[in-house]
Amino acid sequence: MSTPDNHSPPGAEAHGDENAARAEAEAQWRAAFEAAPVRDGTFETMSGVPVAAVHGDPPYPGQYPYTRGIYPSMYRSRLWTMRLFAGMGTAADTNRRFKKLLEAGGTGLSTAFDMPTLMGRDSDDPWAVGEVGRAGVAVDTVADVEDLFAGIDLGDVSTSMTINGPANILMAMYIVTGERGGTERGRLSGTIQNDILKEYQAQKEYIFPPRPSVRLVTDLIAFTTAEMPRWHPTSISGYHIREAGSTAAQELAFTLANGFAYVEAAMAAGLDIDDFAGRLSFFFNSHIDFFEEIGKYRAARRIWAHWMRDRYGAKQERSLQLRFHTQTAGVSLTAQQPEVNIARVATQALAAVLGGTQSLHTDSYDEALALPTEQAARIALRTQQVIAHETGAANVADPLGGSAYVEWMTDEMERRATEVFDHLDKLGEGSILEGVYEGIANGYFVGEIADSAYRFEREVNAGRRIIVGVNAHTESDDSDTPTLRIDEDVEDLQLARLAEVKQRRDSGAVVVALEKLAADAADPTINLMEPIIECVRVEATEGEIVNALEGVFGTYTEPAVV
Amino acid sequence: MSDPAGGAAGPDAERDPQHTQPVRVVLAKLGLDGHDRGLKVVARMLRDAGLEVIYLGLRQTAESILLAVEQEDADVIGLSIHNGGHLTLAPRMVRAVRAAGLDTPVVVGGIVPELDLERLQTAGVFAVLGPGASATEVAHTVRAAAAGHP
């Protein structure tokens, strides 16, 4: 069968039931497909051959368990969101980069914060020296977030904020920025990463211990569920797990396990699964092993659908559908012959599209050297545009579905992930959430990831795994790659900005708001979002809010184990 | 990709010219940066190469690293920096070592743009190991640092 359109099955009489089921799946698919919008595009090959939207066997895209995609029409209705991550220097610097990306045809904003901001420290904190504005934009107070989005209509863009430990604080700053600019919270659209579990496992940007941190995550989920229907309150992220060295199967397994953990935590906090599950989203890596990646995305959708329906009792279709953002693998970029990275990124981006991603960030070729230059970021965006408009890959949903190899790979990824779920389920005595806490406490996740990272490194060192330009084909003309320089005066500018806000604000009101927050934090039944929003409104700094919470929650230090 | 930037002879050159004792290296992340994949891989590489690794891990200060160097009688300090803070953090470490009256060499690993190598060298950093440095290069550089010559 080439399309659901012209299907005429052989042996119809011998397989009457099967054929009836198939006909029903087709009819359902067709009805859903016809109800979906169609984007502007030419759905035929370069040679003028018209192509149907779906090929192969049911279940079709948009049908449970969504292995083939969550929408019946996939990119025929709407291309993925081309979302490029940006952030450096002061808020005003990043604001200029945002506007350039929007002008160049980017369709969503994505904010990278500097290390002190990610760790809940103000720019004038002794720990922040040397790191202000270096690897992302520096944010201390709501005034910085106002600068960051100056001249951009927050009701009109979708914004992604990559922040975890202090996610509630940055969410509050975005909400207050909206308020001050006339966009009420219910109209704000976007995603906040707010995935703390992977921080203990991989990225290591934690502040408080795991349990109070998960309370903050569920507070944010509960708050947006009630107040912000267009917001995705968490982006459950495998990206960092993979970058830290895991295999594809470990990335899949740990990420989905973290997703199950948040579902259990939110349900334990009294939320109805169908009220919040549809707003959860995921974030995966796209590494260089093309078919393994595609199998990983397909398996992720299938596993999520099964677990949400069968284990957690979700009923609405949206609750069963795994939506995800993808970023190409930063760790696969090489400092040697950096232009070759353009080919790596294109391959990885294509895998994400063939795997059915909802949004995509393509890395810039110079990112093994420094933060990307504007020129490099533009090539990265253009790479997605080539895939979208020239290759024809966006004309058909799940074009690799039915390939014996891809179907086998999908099954294999699921099988390997299931072994991890069984282990965590046992560790947590029937609770994945407790299993994940235990796996953090006993070093399971960090140990597994470090083992995989070292195995890979040894393979590269021994020449068993070829990386072009690194351990093979190393001859090059060593052309200089221009790299981005962060102004050395960023730190001074930011310190002046912070001092100005501290001087103009009503410090009595700040003290009152912070004391109220600390008191509320001591009562686990209180949702901390409104008290945090109040702190932000009176221009308490991020560091002050974190300190107030640390007084109640304590801090987390990782045992130093190799 | 190694760029040994030269360096003063360490005390070990006199104390243990034959390297009868394994070289002892303290490995740490200085500052807030949490990217520890590289540091962990390097720790295992160096152990496999027969060096003694004192792994401090994340969120160390120049003071906490110095304390470990003194307590563990370490020959070399290995710093991992991936977030662009190298021009501040690495010289700060070197100054702290010298202020304590030591000359333990500091080796930096991570993402350091070529333009900054000279500044790190001037600041007294012994060597910078960039992405793609092989296990052999890493062990060689740390041993050379311990022996006090590039």
Image (cartoon, rainbow, N blue to C red):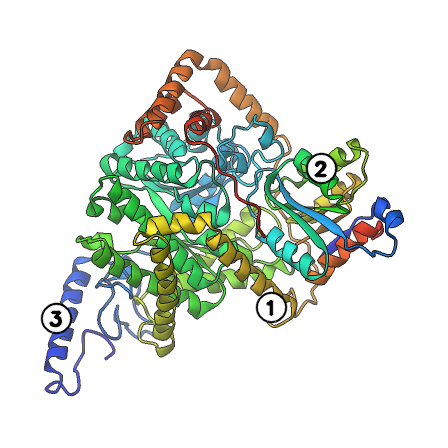
Which quadrant of the figure has residue B20?
bottom right
Mark 2 and mark 3: Cα distance apart in space = 71 Å
Q: Is residue A325 visible?
A: no
Q: Chain of mark 3?
A: A
- Tell me the SS state at disc 3: helix
- Determine whether, in the image, residue A398 is placed left or right of residue A58: right
Task: For label 1, count other residues whose C-alpha is less than 10 Å away and answer few (under 14), some (14-19) or many (20+).
Answer: few
Chain bearing tag 1 is A
At 42% across and 65% down in the image, what residue appears? A293
Residue A125 in view in this figure: yes
Q: Which residue is mark 2?
A: B66
Q: Position of residue A209 (x, y in %)?
A: 44, 38
Task: Report the amino acid beneath label 1.
Answer: Glu
Q: Mark 3 highlights which residue?
A: A24
Lower sequence index among marks 3 and 1: 3
Amino acid residing under circle 3: Glu
- Nearer the camera: disc 2 or disc 3: 2
> Looking at the image, do the residues carrying marks 2 and 1 touch, with CB atoms under 8 Å apart?
no
Q: Is residue A175 above or below residue A367?
A: above
Q: Mark 2 or 1, which is nearer the eye?
A: 2
